[in-house]
Amino acid sequence: MMVKQIIFAVTLLTTLAVFSFTIQRIIRYFKLTRKAFPVRDPVKRFRVMFEVAFVQTKIFRKPVIGLFHALVFWGFCVIAFGSIEMIIDGLFGTDHFMSIFGPLYAIVVASGDIFGLVVAVCIAIFLVRRLFFHIRRFEGIEMKKVSHLDANIALSMILILMISLLGMNMAFVALHAGAAGAFPGVYPISTMFAGVFNGMPSERLNLVYECCWWLHILMIFVFANVLPYSKHFHVFMSIPNVFLSRLEPLGKLPNMDSITREVKLMLNPESVVDMPAGEPVIERFGVKDIEDVSWKNYLDSLACTECGRCTSVCPANLTGKLLSPRKIIMNVRARMKEKGPGLVKEGLRYSDKKSLLRDYITEEELWACTTCNACAKECPININHPTLIIDMRRYLVMEEASAPSGIKWIFGNIENNGAAWQFSAEDRLLWAQDLEIHVN
Ligand code: SF4
Ligand code: SF4
């Protein structure tokens, strides 16, 4: 027993060490980003998290596949209790430690056993769908071979997790079937299938149980360390991302504090006394590269499931334009992966002569956005694409005076006439000259 505990403890410590190394690297990347909005209103945030993340309300916009996805999520939540118990048993040499909770334990174990099968079936459907059917949502210039491979590997790992869980439960039920007295937990699905082990000697049954136990727990450890490098990192990141999502109405664009300050000063130089002292020097307006994005933009990129729901409703993409909102989010993650290590090592002056703008996201993509917010509305984990697109446009306009000619023409009118039209403000009411309208 002791040997098993020692091996388990070493394996667990190794897993935690590798995982914490990865998390520290990600935290260092977060430190490179800019501030976003203040995180206020915790009650509202918990409500949004409950509705969007736990009840999975947005995922049901596609009812059938949405239900499968929701079942997988709920299954993960229930099965996680069993995984915690396995860690306690592995470390302390106990056997089904949580059975001390009596009937509650039986309910959780029974739910975990049922969800084991449900999740396995759903994952098998997802895999078949990805491998043998052409789903338009999973295609696009941003969906490289490696993206598909990543998804298929993660799904296969989850399938192995569920098969090993059911194998472990079935062997456990078969081991205790003939024994006098009750055994901990209730296993409705595994009891149904435990007959496959009929006639197997108990030593061999025990071996099957131990193999499945180790396979299951090792897969969890490997999975936990693979996830941060995979699109399936959303397993960890989607709930915090929903909790920290923007609470303002979708169409509301955040003002730039630095510009607001400049305008206030221009209109009333005395207003400077009302402003906080020591305002930071603005090094760049808008977003050009990865160090200009906010922590929320980066969190969005880590949480993105690459499901393509955003791109599938984007009017620009649907009408053949280059823009894909999923690509914008994926590009943020890829660029941080590329430039992040250099920035961490050499500071913000580090340059690799590339940038998020142009090397990853072209001006054509940015100006194709209609800011309709359909992508943000559709995203099942409340990612907000238009705010980032607008911030990149802000860079183009304010730092490079670069915009499509049609828009530049409007800028000129605003500058000269105080309106988007090409008429002087004094001429605005000329149309009413011969009408008997009294203008005060
Ligand atoms: S806001 Fe822009 S990116 Fe999003 S759906 Fe509309 S056009 Fe597409
Ligand atoms: S941004 Fe949201 S909707 Fe788009 S691919 Fe990522 S998770 Fe899916």
Image (tube, helix red, strand yellow):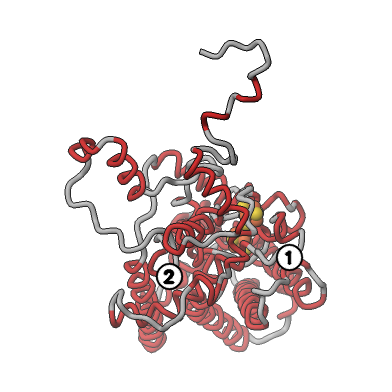
**How far across and how far down the image is residue 384, in percent?**
54, 54
Find residue 151 and report its image quarter: bottom right
- Residue drawn at (63%, 19%), measured in percent from left and top? 433
262 vs 388, nearest the viewer:
262
Mark 1 is surrounded, within 10 Å at the Cα level, by few (under 14), some (14 to 19) or many (20 or more) other residues, namely some
Name the quadrant where ligand 2 sits.
bottom right
Q: Mark 2 points at which residue?
A: 290
Q: Is residue 228 visible?
A: yes
**How far across and how far down the image is residue 320, in percent?**
76, 64
* 147 sits left or right of 53 in the view: right
Query: Vertically, is 50 above or below 64?
Result: above
**How far across and how far down the image is residue 184, in percent?**
53, 64
How far apart, in angstroms, are the residues tagged by discs 2 and 1? Answer: 27 Å
Q: Name the residue under label 1.
A: 137
Does label 2 or label 1 sit earlier along the sequence?
Answer: 1
Query: Vertically, is 311 above or below 228?
Result: above
Q: At numbered mark 1, what does the secondary structure look like: helix, strand or loop?
A: helix
Q: Can residue 178 be seen in this view?
A: no
- Residue drawn at (59%, 41%), measured in percent from left and top? 422
Find residue 352 and report its image quarter: bottom left
Q: Residue furthest front?
A: 434
Give the position of the N terminus as an image quadrant: bottom left
217 vs 92, nearest the viewer:
217
436 vs 167, nearest the viewer:
436
- Residue drawn at (77%, 55%), measured in percent from left and top? 64
